[in-house]
Image: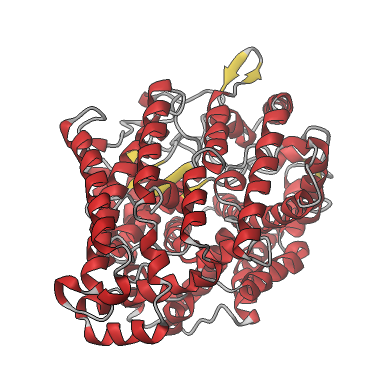
Amino acid sequence: MPSAFSASRSNLFRQIPFVSNGASAASPSDADLGDLPVWKLEDLYPSRDSTEFVNDLSRAMEMALAFETRWKGRLSDAAARTGDEGLGAAIAAYEALDDLVGRIGSFAGLTYYSDTASPANGKFFGDVQAKLTDLSAHLLFFPLELNRIDDSQIDACLKADERAAHYAPWLLDLRKDKPFQLDDRLEQLFLEKSMTSAGAFNRLFDETMADLRFDLDGEKLPLERTLNLLQEPDEETRRKAAAALSKTFGENLRVFTLITNTLAKDKEIGDRWRGFEDIADSRHLANRVEREVVDALAAAVREAYPRLSHRYYAMKAKWLGMEQMNFWDRNAPLPESPNALIPWNEAKETVLAAYGRFAPEMAAIAGRFFDEGWIDAPARAGKAPGAFAHPTVPSAHPYVLVNYLGKPRDVMTLAHELGHGVHQVLAGEQGALMCQTPLTLAETASVFGEMLTFRALLERTTDRRERKAMLAQKVEDMINTVVRQIAFYDFERKVHTARREGELTAEQIGELWLSVQSESLGPAIRISEGYETWWTYIPHFIHSPFYVYAYAFGDCLVNSLYAVYQNAESGFQQKYFDLLKAGGTKHHSELLAPFGLDATDPAFWSKGLSMIEGLIDELAALDQV
């Protein structure tokens, strides 16, 4: 049982590349944005030194040792019994311990990501992770030993033991890992070494990124604030920001190249020992999605590049009065785009109104995040960049981190993360072992929340120029979520494949990066010197290899799902809530069947991509008016 925080955060950490939630050039003050909330981690523990936290950390180790003593080597016998000596009782005890460990790990992780630049926070996080890893070594036997029990015995147990039957989805899902399971001592070695291998380089990446500063006319800005300048109306401001980003990334290429090479090799070693055939198969297994489904998605998106990104960026270059845009102009606002900052309360009301229009229950759950201190909104030095929703554990509640600076995209990010939050609250009913949703479906609620918010705003917009700006922004977000993420997936595949032949230089990685960027962005974007280093700051490549296709999966899925919603007479909302409440208890095929959708059908992806193409068509029509 590795740290619950490390697993959950990597699943739901969100950062749209090149569309960050940083500050503008003017760096809006709290007075401009209103009262920005800071999360209340006291709901987990009063403080790192509190009696409650110290006692729980000690109690967790005692419980792990007692659990190991009672159940190790006895699970086959337990599968033949019921009651307190049965397998159901063992799983229930394991789940209770998982919830406790998850609460401890979540508190340490959220404290750290509140300020990654704090040495005290770094030490606290590292110390807690080390203790939880030591604790997990005593629990590692449990899933391994369960998977050595014969299938027929498990089937008989599920029929005879009512408590075990409750965990049937978890037990059956766990057995999908069986072909890639090593012997107990090797699994323990992998677990214990994770702190000094992948875990250590993940932390090095996070702390390096937090310390980076970018020179803008003598002002030293952190990453978030600098990235945000790429959304400024002034072309010279965007150019200077891009130059500052390229310069600092270039100055730190050595450390990022080392991190990338090390983690790619570490993954290759693990995959080889476990017997995975393809470099992304371990991610597909974790996502409970078939390789063929992902391959079909990626192929459909690549085939659509000319109709989507290439076509849109050509249109945008014309709107900006350019024959060809520079890479730093890609997310520039249109002349029609409003420049006014959106105060926090307005963002809150916008999202909750859109959610409430779909289903009052959805707005009520999202409202708790605002009312009960579950959101951390200010952009401050040392805070983790981007945005994420962390589920913590079912006995507590989720938390959302955003870096809110009043941009329209910040409102969409808030809607996205609250979609995750609502999903996590509803799935929490499944308990600690069955609440976590595979990445591919975890993005469903978040992207659906964005879509609800966008559609609500669009419907109340009557001005043609404002509608054009809104549509363009949505198309750009969809391109970032679908086209860009599949390009990122292709980049990762190239890097991990090439790494198997030996260490890669920074120049080689940069060449691979530029190859996929040129293909996906198209001829309307001029890729010039400096851009070859921009692979360095994408956190998904570090924290969750091959995570990125989940965004494209989720966006296309939601596009299809939203089309069903628009045409449904009644009952859609209940089916949708049933999907969210299922957590990790059902395969994507079971969850989508009530909506008449099938991700294994190649036409499914075409349907999702056609919605993006339709929005581009609408923009083209507005251009003719």
Residue 36 vs 375, above or below: the answer is above
**Is residue 394 visible to the viewer in this orientation of the structure?**
no
Residue displayed at 45% across by 29% down: 116
Placement of 35 over or under 358, stated as above or below: above
Q: Position of residue 120 (x, y in %)?
A: 38, 22
Q: Residue at x 26, y 30 (%)?
A: 48
Query: Number of labelled discs?
Result: 0
Which is nearer the eye, 191 or 307?
191
503 with respect to 352 (left or right): right
Q: Nearer the viewer, residue 288 or 32?
A: 288
Can residue 547 be seen? Answer: yes
Give the side of residue 475 with respect to residue 307, left or right. left
Q: Position of residue 324 (x, y in %)?
A: 82, 44
- Farthest residue toward the top? 218
Q: Nearer the viewer, residue 530 or 362?
A: 530
Q: What is the x, y in percent for residue 8?
A: 41, 52
Q: Is residue 424 left or right of residue 144?
A: left
User: Quarter holding the C terminus?
Assistant: bottom right
> Which residue is nearer to you in this view: 369 or 563?
369
Q: Is residue 63 above or below residue 151?
A: above
- Residue 578 placement (x, y as % from top left): 32, 74
Q: Tell me which colouring the rendered structure shows.
A: secondary structure
Q: Is the N terminus in the top left, top right, bottom left or bottom right quadrant?
A: bottom left
Image height of 35 relative to 10, above or below: above
